[in-house]
Amino acid sequence: MEIEGGDYAYGYLKSENGVHRLVRVSPYNAQGKRMTSFASVFVSPLVDDTIEVYVDPAKVSWDLFRSGGAGGQNVNKVETGVRLRYQYTDPDTGEEEEILIENTESRKQLENRNNAMRLLKSQLYDRAMKKRLEAQAKIEAGKKKIEWGSQIRSYVFDDRRVKDHRTNYQTSDVDGVMDGKIDDFIKAYLMEFPVTEE
């Protein structure tokens, strides 16, 4: 489900990441036995999936050369081949690197320039996409397996108790919690982390 809500929505809700354990007397069990269910909750930020590729004209330089090879009378006389050099700066690390693209697809210099620019944009897009996938993989690594001992919170109906195993905060208001009253759990979780000033 998608949640939209005010400032810091993800910062608050990421505290719900993990396995939630529910213990209750099942209405579907004829012997009235307690049943345990698990639900894995994974909260991730919704990111804009558009990647805008910006090519800084000041970092572009062109070399022209003769295409060479067999092909028509102009092929060896006119400089139709293009070499694009782009001084790329990684936005995260600040590392600089030269991207070099040569294009001789067409007999027309302008078409080769356009093709080289298109290839450059594709490379920049690919780099941005890889960074996004790496960031998503880091978030995904926080997922927990659904198994005994990995739960972050237990909801025990017949004992009238909801307990968070990370913070030891608990309440007897099971119905309230099931209706969405989880602010105290979120606050207790956030209080576990010291505030650092930069």
Image (tube, rainbow, N blue to C red):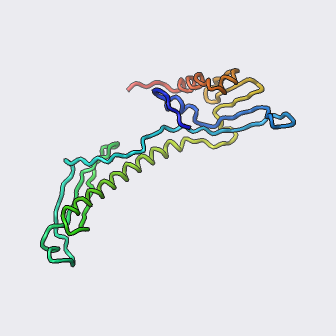
- Residue depicted at 49% across the width and 25% down the height: 194
Compared to residue 104, the image places residue 55 above or below, namely: above
- Name the one closer to the observer, 8 or 164: 8
Percent coordinates x, y for residue 97 in the rendering: 28, 52
- Name the one closer to the observer, 46 or 110: 110
Compared to residue 99, the image places residue 176 above or below, namely: above
Q: Is residue 38 left or right of residue 84?
A: right
- Image quadrant in which the C terminus is located: top left
Q: Is residue 27 left or right of residue 185?
A: right
Q: Is residue 100 left or right of residue 127?
A: left
- Residue depicted at 65% across the width and 26% down the height: 179
Q: Is residue 14 left or right of residue 134?
A: right
- Residue depicted at 22% across the width and 62% down the height: 111
Percent coordinates x, y for residue 63 in the rendering: 17, 60
Compared to residue 27, the image places residue 146 above or below, namely: below
Residue farthest right in this picture: 31
Percent coordinates x, y for residue 53 in the rendering: 32, 48
Percent coordinates x, y for residue 24 in the rendering: 76, 32
* Residue 64 position by quadrant: bottom left
- Image quadrant in which the N terminus is located: top right
- Residue depicted at 18% across the width and 64% down the height: 109
- Name the one closer to the observer, 144 or 111: 111
Residue farthest left in this picture: 77
Q: Number of callouts in the render?
A: 0
* Residue 158 position by quadrant: top right
* Residue 26 position by quadrant: top right
